[in-house]
Image (spheres, coloured by chain):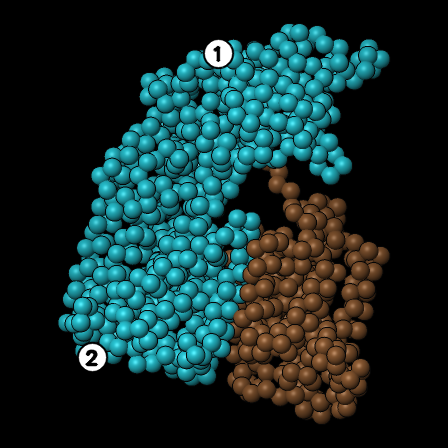
Chain colours: A cyan, B brown
C-alpha cells in the first residue's frame, strides 16, 4: 500500500520536474542563465551516478572528475579529429567510461572505505596527468578547442534545443537512478553496505552489486562528459582536478546521499554557489572548504536526508505486535518444501581440518549429515563448532579435507555460490541489514530468484512488475510464518533481539534452502521464544529441510535432534543418537571435568 | 654509472620524505583506524612556517622547535575536533571529508597570507653539493634519509620499551579493552596524532630547502604518503619506510629514463596496480573475519 503511494509520489515529482524544465527557457532572461542551467543539469547527471556508488553501495569515490575527463576528452577528440557527431561520440564516451568503471570497481573485491578512496584519487591524478602530458592527442594544458556545435544528422542544435537534449538525458538518468534504487539491484547494493557476510549468505556476490553501481555511475558520467565538452566547446585539464572530484562527492552528500532528490539539489547548490562565492574573492576556496566542514558537522545526512529524518521523527509512533509463530502459511510450504529424499547423505564431511596459525580449530572431522534430519553440533566453548559451520557455509576455507554436498564436492567454494546451491545460514550475532525494513531484508533473500534483468528493471517492463509483486507476496507470507508481518515496514535494527533472530531465519528461508545452518539460534531468547523456535525447527524438518544446529541449550537439543555430534578441542569425541551421546563418558568428562572432580 | 648513482641518491632523499609522511599516516591509523587525510597540509605548514620565521630573522635553530610545536598543536586539534567525533561511523566518510575540508581551508588561508608563489628556505646544507661516485648531492638531501631511519628506530624503541608506547600499541589493538584496563584512550590517540604532526612538520622543514615552500605543496605529498603507507600495509612502520624509499627511487628512475612529465601518471598507476595485487599491503597482514 505505502509502496503505491511512494510510486505515485515519484510520478508527481517527475511530472513537476518535467514541467519546470519545459518552461524554464521562457522565464530566463538571457543565454548566460540558460547555460548555467545546462551545466547544472550535467552536474546533476554526474551526481545521480555518484549517488548510486556513495548512497547505495556505500563506497567513496574521489575520482569522478577523472571519469568525466575521459568522457569529455573522448567526445572532443572524436568530434574534432574524426568528425563524429554527438550520438556516436557520446556512445563511445559512455563505453570507455563504463569500461573504466568496471576496472575501478574491481578492487572493491577486497578493499573498501579509505583504501578505495586512495585508488580513486590515484585514478583521477593519473587521468589528469595524462591529459596534461599526452599533448599530441589531448592538446596538453591548453586542451582541445573548436569542438563543433552539437548536431544530429547534420542539423546543428541551437542553445534552447541543446538545453532540451540535456534535460531529456537528465530525466532519463533520474528515472534510471530511481528505478535502480527501488529494485532488487538497489536493495543488494544497500544490503552489501550494511552486512557483506549476510548478502553472501543469501547468494549475492557483493562485488557484482558494487560493480554495477560503479559502472552505471561511470556510464552516466561518460555522457555527462560528452555533453560538457559540447556545451563549453573546449576542454582542458583544469576542470578535472582532485578538487572537482571532491565537489561531485560534496554535491551528493550536501543534497543527501541515498535520497532521490538529493543529488539534484546538491548539484544545483554547488553550481550556483560559486557565483555567490565570487563576492568572497580570494577567500573563495576557503569558503568552499568551510562549507564541506559545516555540512559534515551539522548535516551529515544532507539536506533531503535531514528533512526525511525530522519528518520521520514527527510521525506518530505506532505499537507493533508480534504474532504467534510458526504460523500456518500454505504459500511458505510451497516455497520451502524440499522433495523427499530422506535417509540419504546430504552433507558428507571428510577429514576436515582448519588451522588458524598454530591453532587447530577443527582436527580431522568426518561426519555424515542425513537429508531431512536435525543434526546438532555441541561442545564446550572454543570446541570449533562455529568454525565447522563456517566451513560448511563457505565462509572459511578448510586447510584440508573435503565436503560433499549431494554429489558435488563443494570444498573451497565461496559462500554465495553455496547459498545458490541451497545452503542457507543464520549467524551467532545476528547479521541483518539494519537500516533496511524488515520486508526488504526478506526481499534481499529472494534476489537470486529474480529472472528479469537490468534492462527490464530499469524500463519497468511488465515482467518485472509481475515478478516484484510476486516476491512481495511471498516475502509477506514468510513474515507471517515467523509472526513478524506487523513489523514489515519497520527498520530491522529497531527490532527486539528475539525478533531479529526470527527475521534472520525468514531471510534464510527465502532462498528455499536444502540445508539450513543455525548458529546458536536460541542464544538470548526467552523461555517461551525457545519453545516457539523448537516448533519452528520441527516444522522446517517436516518440510524435509536438513537442519544443522549449533547450540548450547542442551534440553532443546535433546528434544529436537536426530543426531548429536560432540566436539571438543576441534575433534569429534562422540556422535550418535541424543540419548547415546548423553551417556558417553567422554562427553560427560568434556562438560563436567574428569570423574574425580564430578564426585567431589 | 654516475647517472644511476645520482638517481639512487636523490631517490632515497625524496623517498625518505614520503617515508616520513607515510609513517605519520601509519601512526595515526594505528591509534584510531582513521587519519588526518590532509596530513600533506601539515607538511606544508611546517615548510611555510619555517620560511616565514627565518624570514622574520629568527634563527633556524630556534624556528624549528616553534614550528614543530605549532604543527603538534594543529595535529591534536584536528584529532580532537575533526577525527574523533566521526570514529563511530562505519563508512569512514565523515573523518575523511572533515579533514579534507579543514585541509582546503588551511591551504587557502596560507595562499592568501603567504602568497601563491614558492619560496626557498635557506640553510647552510644546500650551499655546496658533495660528490659521491660522480653524482652530486646536497648534504641536506642526505640528512633526510638519516633522519627518517633514526626516527624509525626511536619510534620502535618508544613503542616497545616505554609505558606510553606500549599503551598506544594496546589502544591500536583493541580500544575498548585498553580503555577497560585503565589506559586513557583519548590521551593516547592525541599523543599519536601529535607525533604524526611533529613528523609531518619536520618533513616539511627538511624538504623546504630542496623543493621550496608553497601553499599547494602538501596535496600531492600527502596523497603519495598515504598511498605508500597503504601499499606497504599501513600498520607496519618498517614496511612504510622501506616502501617510501623504494617509491622515491622509482620516481627518479622514471624521471631519468622516461621523462619527468610521466612521473605522476606512471607512479600513481603503479600504486593502483600494487593495491589491486596486495589489497592488505605488501607487508600487511590480512585481518581475520569473525562471525
Q: Chain of mark 1?
A: A
- Position of A68 with respect to B162 (left or right) is left
Q: Residue at x 22, y 46 (%)?
A: A8
Q: Residue at the location (70% across, 49% down)?
A: B173
State the quadrant of the N terminus of chain A.
Answer: top left
Callout 1: helix, strand or loop?
loop
Determine the image quadrant of residue B79. bottom right
In percent of width and height, residue A525 lies at 54, 24
Residue A378 x %, y %: 65, 20
Element under label 2?
Answer: loop
Find residue B255 and report its horizontal and vertical position in percent. Answer: 62, 77
Would residue A279 be seen by someone viewing this image from the given angle?
A: yes
Q: Residues within 10 Å of mark 1 (few under 14, many from 20)?
A: some
Along the viewing direction, whichever of A254 and A463 lies nearer the viewer: A463
Q: Quadrant of the C terminus of chain A?
A: top right
- Residue A317 is marked as none
Question: With respect to residue A587, does A175 lie above or below?
Answer: below
Could you tell me if the residues under marks 2 and 1 are in contact, i.e. CB atoms within 8 Å?
no
Where is B190 relative to A358, above or below? below
Q: CA distance from mark 2 to mark 1?
A: 79 Å
Q: Is residue A510 above or below residue B190?
A: above
* Residue on which disc 1 sits: A342
Q: Which numbered disc, 2 or 1, marks the residue that appears first in the sequence?
A: 2
Horizontal side, residue B153 vs residue A189: left or right: right
Q: Nearer the viewer, residue B155 or B13?
A: B13
* Left or right of B227 on screen, residue A416: left
Q: Which residue occupies 79% across, 86% down?
A: B130
Letter of the chain that mark 2 sits on in the rendering: A
Q: Nearer the viewer, residue A23 or B68?
A: A23
Q: Which residue is mark 2?
A: A30
Amino acid at each position: 500500500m505505502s509502496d503505491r503511494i511512494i510510486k505515485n509520489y515519484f510520478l508527481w515529482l517527475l511530472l513537476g520536474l518535467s514541467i519546470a524544465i519545459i518552461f524554464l527557457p521562457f522565464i530566463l532572461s538571457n543565454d548566460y542563465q540558460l547555460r548555467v542551467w545546462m551545466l547544472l543539469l550535467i552536474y546533476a547527471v554526474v551526481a545521480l551516478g555518484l549517488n548510486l556508488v556513495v548512497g547505495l553501495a556505500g563506497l567513496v569515490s574521489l575520482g569522478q572528475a577523472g571519469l568525466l575527463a575521459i568522457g569529455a576528452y573522448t567526445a572532443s577528440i572524436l568530434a574534432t579529429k574524426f568528425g563524429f557527431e554527438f550520438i556516436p561520440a557520446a556512445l563511445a564516451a559512455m563505453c570507455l567510461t563504463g569500461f573504466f568503471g568496471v576496472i575501478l570497481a574491481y578492487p572493491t573485491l577486497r578493499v573498501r572505505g579509505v583504501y578505495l578512496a586512495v585508488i580513486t584519487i590515484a585514478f583521477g591524478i593519473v587521468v589528469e596527468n595524462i591529459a596534461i602530458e599526452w599533448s599530441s592527442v589531448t592538446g596538453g594544458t591548453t586542451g582541445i578547442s573548436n569542438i563543433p556545435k552539437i548536431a544530429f544528422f547534420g542539423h546543428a542544435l541551437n542553445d534552447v534545443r541543446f538545453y532540451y537534449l540535456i534535460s531529456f538525458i537528465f530525466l532519463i538518468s533520474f528515472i534510471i537512478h530511481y528505478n535502480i534504487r527501488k529494485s532488487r539491484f538497489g536493495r543488494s547494493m544497500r544490503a552489501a553496505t550494511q552486512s557483506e557476510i549476510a548478502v553472501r549468505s543469501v547468494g549475492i556476490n557483493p562485488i557484482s552489486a558494487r560493480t554495477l553501481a560503479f559502472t552505471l555511475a561511470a556510464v552516466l558520467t561518460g555522457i555527462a562528459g560528452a555533453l560538457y565538452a559540447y556545451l563549453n566547446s573546449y576542454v582542458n585539464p583544469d576542470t578535472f582536478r582532485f578538487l572537482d572530484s571532491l565537489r561531485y562527492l560534496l554535491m551528493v552528500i550536501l543534497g543527501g546521499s541515498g535520497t532521490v532528490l538529493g543529488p539534484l539539489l546538491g548539484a544545483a547548490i554547488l553550481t550556483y554557489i560559486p557565483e555567490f562565492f565570487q563576492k568572497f574573492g580570494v577567500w573563495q576556496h576557503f569558503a568552499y572548504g568551510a562549507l564541506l566542514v559545516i555540512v559534515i558537522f551539522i548535516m551529515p545526512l544532507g539536506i533531503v536526508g535531514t528533512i526525511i529524518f525530522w519528518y520521520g521523527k514527527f510521525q506518530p509512533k505506532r505499537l507493533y505486535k508480534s504474532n504467534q509463530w510458526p504460523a500456518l502459511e500454505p504459500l511458505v510450504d510451497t516455497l520451502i518444501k524440499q522433495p523427499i529424499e530422506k535417509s540419504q547423505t546430504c552433507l558428507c564431511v571428510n577429514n576436515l581440518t582448519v588451522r588458524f596459525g598454530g591453532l587447530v580449530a577443527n582436527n580431522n572431522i568426518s561426519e555424515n549429515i542425513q537429508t531431512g534430519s536435525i543434526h546438532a553440533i555441541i561442545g564446550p566453548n572454543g570446541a570449533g563448532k562455529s568454525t565447522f559451520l563456517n566451513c560448511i557455509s563457505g565462509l572459511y576455507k578448510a586447510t584440508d579435507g573435503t565436503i560433499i554436498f549431494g554429489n558435488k564436492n563443494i570444498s573451497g567454494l565461496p559462500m554465495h555460490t553455496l547459498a545458490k546451491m541451497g545452503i542457507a545460514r543464520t549467524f551467532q550475532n545476528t547479521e541483518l541489514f539494519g537500516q533496511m525494513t524488515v520486508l526488504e531484508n526478506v526481499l534481499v533473500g529472494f534476489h537470486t530468484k529474480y529472472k528479469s534483468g537490468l534492462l527490464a528493471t530499469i524500463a519497468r517492463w511488465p515482467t518485472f512488475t509481475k515478478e516484484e509483486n510476486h516476491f512481495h507476496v511471498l516475502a509477506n507470507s514468510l513474515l507471517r510464518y515467523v509472526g513478524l508481518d506487523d513489523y514489515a515496514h519497520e527498520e530491522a535494527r529497531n527490532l527486539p533481539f528475539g525478533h531479529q533472530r526470527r527475521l534472520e531465519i525468514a531471510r534464510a528461508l527465502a532462498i528455499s534452502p536444502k540445508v539450513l545452518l543455525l548458529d546458536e539460534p536460541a542464544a538470548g531468547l526467552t523461555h517461551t521464544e525457545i519453545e516457539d523456535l523448537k516448533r519452528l525447527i520441527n516444522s522446517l524438518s517436516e518440510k524435509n529441510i536438513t537442519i544443522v544446529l549449533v547450540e548450547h541449550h542442551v534440553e532443546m537439543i535433546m528434544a529436537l535432534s536426530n543426531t548429536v555430534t560432540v566436539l571438543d578441542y576441534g575433534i569429534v569425541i562422540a556422535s550418535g543418537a541424543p540419548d547415546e551421546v548423553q551417556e558417553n563418558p567422554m562427553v560427560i568428562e568434556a562438560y563436567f571435568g574428569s570423574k574425580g572432580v564430578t564426585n567431589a | 654509472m654516475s647517472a644511476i648513482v645520482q638517481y639512487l641518491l636523490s631517490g632515497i632523499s625524496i623517498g625518505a620524505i614520503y617515508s616520513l609522511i607515510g609513517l605519520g599516516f601509519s601512526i595515526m591509523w594505528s591509534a584510531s583506524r582513521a587519519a588526518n587525510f590532509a596530513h600533506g597540509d601539515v607538511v606544508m605548514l611546517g615548510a611555510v612556517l619555517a620560511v616565514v620565521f627565518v624570514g622574520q630573522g629568527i634563527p633556524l635553530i630556534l624556528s624549528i622547535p616553534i614550528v614543530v610545536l605549532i604543527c603538534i598543536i594543529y595535529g591534536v586539534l584536528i584529532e580532537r575536533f575533526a577525527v574523533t567525533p566521526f570514529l563511530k561511523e562505519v563508512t569512514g566518510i565523515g573523518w575523511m571529508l572533515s579533514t579534507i575540508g579543514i585541509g582546503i581551508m588551511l591551504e587557502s588561508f596560507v595562499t592568501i597570507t603567504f602568497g601563491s608563489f614558492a619560496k626557498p628556505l635557506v640553510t647552510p646544507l644546500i650551499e655546496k653539493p658533495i660528490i659521491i661516485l660522480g653524482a652530486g648531492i646536497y648534504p641536506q638531501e642526505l640528512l633526510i634519509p638519516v633522519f627518517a631511519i633514526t626516527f624509525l628506530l626511536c619510534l620502535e624503541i618508544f613503542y616497545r620499551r616505554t609505558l606510553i608506547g606500549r599503551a598506544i600499541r594496546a589502544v591500536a589493538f583493541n580500544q575498548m579493552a585498553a580503555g577497560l584496563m585503565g589506559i586513557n584512550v583519548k590521551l593516547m590517540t592525541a599523543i599519536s596524532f601529535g607525533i604524526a604532526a611533529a613528523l609531518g612538520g619536520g618533513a616539511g622543514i627538511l624538504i623546504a630547502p630542496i623543493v621550496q615552500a608553497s601553499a599547494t605543496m602538501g596535496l600531492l605529498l600527502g596523497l603519495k604518503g598515504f598511498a605508500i603507507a597503504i601499499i606497504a600495509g599501513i600498520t607496519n612502520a618498517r614496511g612504510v619506510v622501506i616502501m617510501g624509499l623504494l617509491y622515491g627511487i622509482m620516481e627518479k628512475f622514471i624521471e631519468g629514463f622516461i621523462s619527468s612529465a610521466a612521473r605522476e601518471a606512471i607512479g600513481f598507476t603503479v600504486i593502483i596496480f600494487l593495491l589491486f595485487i596486495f589489497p592488505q599491503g605488501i607487508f600487511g597482514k590480512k585481518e581475520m573475519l569473525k562471525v
